[in-house]
Amino acid sequence: MERAGVLKVIYTQCISRYSKETCFLFIFQADIQICRWEKEVSLNHLFYVAIRGDDITVKSYRVESRITSRFCHTTVKSSVVNSGPNAQSIGFNVQIPKRAFITNFTMNVNGIMFVGSVKEKTVARNLYAQARARGKAAGLVRYRTDMETFKTEVHVPPGSKIEFELHYQEMMQRKLGFYEHSLYLQPGRLVPQFQVDVYIYEPNGIASVETPNTLGEHFSGMAKLTSSKDKAHVVFKPSLQQQRKCENCTTSAIDGIFTVKYDVLRDSNAGELHYWSLLFQFKMKQTVEAMQTILDDLTMDDYFSIVDFNHNVRCWSEELVQGSTIQVAEAKKYIQNIKPNGGTNINEALMRAVQMLVKASNQGMIDPRSVSMIMLVSDGDPTVGEIKLSAIQKNVKKVMREEFSLFSLGIGFDVDYDFLERIAMENRGVAQRIYTSHDASDQIRRFYSQVSSPLLRKITVQFPEDSVSDVTQNHFDKYFSGSELVVAGKVLPSESTTLNSFTTAFADRLDLSLQTEADYLELDAALAQQQHAFTGFARQMWAYITVNQLLAERSLAPTAGKKRKITQRILNLAVEHQFVTPLTALLVESEEAKERLLADSPRDPKQGCCAGIVHSLPPWVRMTTPAPPSHAERPLPDHITIVENDPHFIVHLPKNNMDVCFNIDSEPGHILNLVSDPGAGVVVNGQLVGSKRVEEKEKVNTYFGTISVFYQPDGIRVSVTTDRIDLTDGHGFLFEPHAMIPVCFRVKVSIVKDSKVMVTVDDKITVMVLLHRVWKKHPTHVDFLGLYIPNNNQYSSQAHGLIGQFGQEPEVRVFNLHQGADPLKKEATMEVKGNKLVVTRGWQKDYRRDKKRGSDVFCWFIHNSGKGFIDGHYTNYIVPRLDSFLPLPL
């Protein structure tokens, strides 16, 4: 049901019981909640309309996938006409698999062709910036890997014809005995020429092919399949009438995932390993049912326990117990009685889990050939005990034995998925994000099914010396039932056309040794004759596997030098093979490079759902460039809350018509929370840097070296340092050009050259960061940032932080004015928040109009780092990360 329909139903039910005023308020709140639902479920495979626009005609929509030896190349094409009377924006959106790499995007607008080429991200951005600086048309096409969505938009006059074409490649993964190829189809309207073709060629033979009815009963039996021993072709081509939701409907029923499942002929497996599984449970209602199902899967050969963690860590059993019917029933009762609570002590919980496995191993309970697993399920970042992620990672690595594996499940977007992925990969496991929708328990069950049946351990695939080079990963810790291990490499020139491989592994009750032999010239000849195959698949597959493995290695690189070397290898391969990765970008240029677009992928997978669109396109499509920052900024009032220098806080209290000052005397590296507003989803944090130390005993002054503004609903973070401005979508900007950057629909960033950055959230909250540069050779001074926050920011009632708490202005009374120890500074008594404080009259600086000398702001100074004026102690405002909200209550 459309959102309007949902609201109408809510209103009808509401008006029968309550007043109109109440119901209108309820509808408003419901609309917000539905927006949140839409944001979340869109991440869980609900879809964007592929072609967006009013009064448009979609002439055709075609999808073609060619799968050759598990490697897939997909092309999505659409032809659209603006058939309306006015100029308008037309969007082209494609949902792609998470592991896929975009390889090209082309666009033909009224006969002008835009063609893409993958370049190193910095090179592509520089070319894009040059186009803007020279007044040429330039736009952004943001590619979001976390949402698996490619989005672009063009604004065109009436009668315009646009052709979109997107290419992406992926390696098919075998799970639970099948390869599953999914295509996300939601044209959003009836299409005269709608067709999907999936071609499969597997040289070793196809065991089975099926097309599950994933699009619903409306299209039952419409997918046509033809197959032979090694080839298959699936075509889905509903007519215009068949696309209609009903006989006379004008809307399309095509809305969902089109799936093709298949498997290849293979030898039987080598038998299943028994294993001991340690379930690691966190307090999430969505996981109770899933955990109970997992417990049902345990047998008498399994040993397990459960660790529940929040502020405290509790073990259902201090030792591993046998998976008997009685023990499983007791464990289910324990899980059912877990109640939600605050805090997340991940470090201590993992230590307890490892200790349990170590104890069982030392007592001889664990067979050396078995697989011992810890499954970590968490919905939040650590807040209790050790909270530094790198320290937790190091602690776990130190105690984990080689025969233990750690699997991580991150629930929702409040968890640092990067951390869960790193800690799993480093300890012979894998991670998966669980989206907190209605089927969260099913997602956990599916993940468990994939890892719950390990068949082989310590698998090694080797080739004769001097026969191959550039071999991808050929040592694997585990092989799971229904999965597949793939090794690729380059065959070296040789007189022989035969390639041999040798595989060794350990199974439950035997050691395995296999030898294979293949004539690769025969295979090349066979591939060349196949229309189902796509040219150069083997070369692309090798590069795809290599780049993905290097990206994983890069995230675990122990040193900066090692990381740089891996980065360069990724860049070289990605550019050579035209993969859009987190380190590369797709530069889309018109003929003679008169106009440029930049298709960019983010580097942080913890992002939310706000996707970028083209914001500036050629003059012939009548889309104007953004206004310069001076016209786009939300103006700041004269009286404002300021943080400057080392750091001096100047809090303006408009109701009391006064300014109150205090310093924070903290340590370099500490991150201070300035504004934490969970109601508005906004957090502003600042990280301190130290001055240069002249003598060992000399006090080090601290300044803000980084200011971060994080908007949680859309997962957008803007981090400003003294060198650059970084966005969570991977874009980085220097303080050089003037720029207005619409990061997403609700977050805007404007940059004034060598001066300041303005971040505006939802047109309600503004933060200005002022850049202070000093002489590089100064013996003590360092570059630093000033912060300016207007008092008319529209915070919610939940706002807190060193500055945010004064959104609810306290009553302040100053009396007993008298001469102080310094004849130039008077003292007085201030009554605030139930405290009586001795305050001193002084002044600080506002550098907005004069960055060298500043202007004086007279204020009452609070001693002892604001004690008595701020809630609690200043150390309560130290947070672990730049996007961390302040834990409440203080």
Image (cartoon, rainbow, N blue to C red):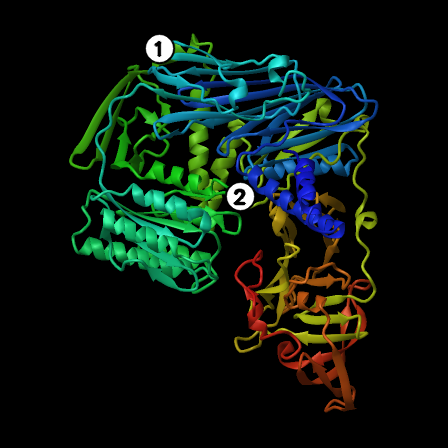
Q: Nearer the viewer, residue 434 or 140?
A: 434
Camera sees residue 744:
no
Q: What quarter of the picture does the C terminus occupy?
A: bottom right
Horizontal placement of 190 versus 317: left or right? Answer: right
Q: Nearer the viewer, residue 729 or 224?
A: 224
**Residue 605: image tag:** 2
Foreground tag (2 vs 1): 1
Question: For numbered disc 2, what is the local secondary structure?
Answer: loop
**Mark 1: few/some/many CA within 10 Å (<14, 14-19, 20+):** some
| Residue ID at (46%, 39%) | 551
Residue 628 point in image, percent of width and height: 81, 45
| Residue ID at (59%, 44%) | 608
**Residue 370: image tag:** none
Horizontal placement of 179 versus 663: left or right? Answer: left
Residue 787 point in image, percent of width and height: 71, 62
**Residue 229: image tag:** 1
